[in-house]
Image: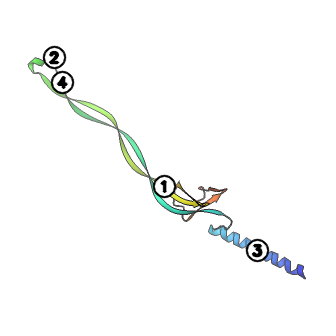
Amino acid sequence: MKNSLLAPLIFCGVAVLAIAAYAGTRTGMNPWQDYADVVSVELAFDDQQTARQACNAEAVNKIQKHMREGNTETVGEQRCGVFYDNHVVPAGFDVTYRLNGKQNVVRMDHDPGKRIRVEDGELDLSRS
């Protein structure tokens, strides 16, 4: 009599676990998966320099051979130089997270939401 009740109980237990595991993977909430909790997300920016060449005409006092006659003329010479423009560009998101009681920051290209998947004790950024 005990064997006749044991098989259906085992079957039901396995079925419930399978359904829970399937539902967890469909919703992205696997109960056996480790996650880091996201504490905050801030937009990140980087400073970037862009080189450009600029030229301008400068007035130069040219002295001719006969200075005593007062013969001088002003001519324009072109002077060129390389200048750097500073720009602030978006660089993703600085994500503060908590894992195993420690808080750290990682830069990501998107907002991960409320948590980040963990594999072998490390953040799995390929799937977050």
Residue 92 - label: 1
Q: What's under tag 1, amino acid-wise?
A: Gly
Q: What's under tag 3, amino acid-wise?
A: Ala
Query: What is the image's colouring?
Result: rainbow
Q: What element carries label 2?
A: loop
Determine the residue positioned at 63% across, 68% down.
29
Q: Write down the quadrant of residue 123 in the picture.
A: bottom right
What is the spatial separation of the Cα atoms under label 1 and label 4, in whole angstroms?
Answer: 55 Å
The nearer-to-camera label among 1 and 4 is: 1
Q: In this view, does 71 lie to the left or right of 37?
A: left
Q: Which of marks 2 and 3 is nearer the N terminus?
A: 3
Q: Is residue 65 left or right of residue 40?
A: left
Q: Earlier in the sequence, mark 3 or mark 4?
A: 3
Q: What's under tag 4, amino acid-wise?
A: Lys
* Other-residue count near label 2 (Cα within 10 Å), few / some / many at <14 / 14–19 / ≥20: few
Q: Write down the quadrant of residue 112 in the picture.
A: bottom right
Determine the residue positioned at 71% across, 73% down.
19
Q: Mark 4 points at which residue?
A: 62
7 or 36, nearer to the observer: 36
